[in-house]
Image (cartoon, rainbow, N blue to C red):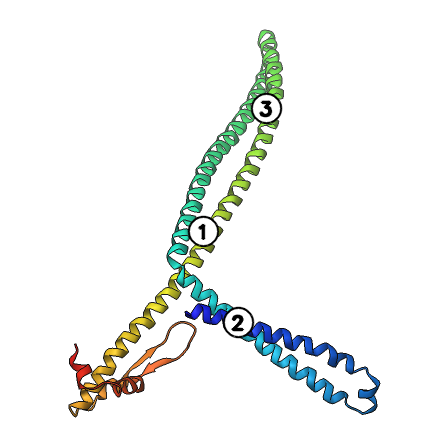
Amino acid sequence: MNRIEQLKDTRAKLVIEMEALKKEIPPFEAALHSEDVINNGRESDVRHEISSRQIKIDSIDHQIFRLDQTLDRLEKLANRESLIEGYITDMANWMADELELNDKRQSLSTRLEEIRQQAQEEITSARQAETQAATAYAQAVAWGDIEGEKAASTDAQKAAKNLTSATEQHRRQLLIITALEQELAIVDSHISEAQLAHQKIEATALRLAHNALEEAWNDAAQKLLDVGGKLYAAARLIGRDPVSLMKLDIPEQGENFGSWRWSELADRGRQHRTRDLLSL
């Protein structure tokens, strides 16, 4: 039975124990209201029975919570190759989506700017034409130019019609601009979603990589301690004092927050004999 199976077995036993304790509480709760308990002043004893069981339940529940964390870590580490491969694929897909959305955004932004500029230029040009026609008409009247007045009047009427058409066109263009702005906002929202999804997957993948590296660190530390134990034993057998090894302090990574010190080398060193040390 490997460690994962052992932990699952332990968890199952804890669940059974916790459920059994939970079933014991209702009878005590009912007893609190019984005449026998009340008349004999045993409420405190009954409450103590309930409290003691609830404390055990809370303790077991916390143990299960910690076990679930450990199991999740170990199961992901056991399947890390396939998980990492899946994370990489998912990140690539989200990145491709983001690139595609950015292309759409660029296209929308370019078209939006073109329409804005066109709308502004057309309405400005129409207004200027109307103003110029009105100015020409006023000048013709001022100089008594009958023919010029007629021509300017005709131009003013054309300019007014053109301005009316330009105003209607401008209104339609504003509707298009609003629609493009809304579409651009939707695309921006999708880009943000893609970025967030990518970041979440990346963070999950990095946590798994971090856990795997912690395990690799601990494995490497164990190998170093094995060599250190032999080094300690060899020094002891030849009468040398392994002073430098006494400075050893290797922090353990992962769920435990301890460290391996020189005493670990001493314990391992006592297990080795000359034949062990000569088997290099």
Viewer can see residue 272: yes
- In-front residue for pair 196/34: 34
Mark carried by residue 198:
1
Say what amino acid the circle numbered 1 marks: His
Say what amino acid the circle numbered 2 marks: Arg
- Say left or right for 17 vs 47: left
- In-front residue for pair 117/28: 28
- Crowding at mark 3 (Cα within 10 Å: few <14, some 14-19, many 20+): some
Q: Which residue is disc 3 drawn over? A: 169
Secondary structure of residue under mark 2: helix
Image position of 189 with respect to 254: above or below: above
Q: Earlier in the sequence, mark 1 or mark 2?
A: 2
- Between the residue at mark 3 and the residue at mark 1, the CA separation in whole angstroms equals 43 Å
Residue 184 x/y as whole percent: 53, 39
Mark carried by residue 176:
none
- Between the residue at mark 3 and the residue at mark 2, the CA separation in whole angstroms equals 73 Å
The quarter holding residue 132 reads top right
Image position of 211 with respect to 267: above or below: above
Q: Residue at x 26, y 86 (%)?
A: 271
- Crowding at mark 2 (Cα within 10 Å: few <14, some 14-19, many 20+): many
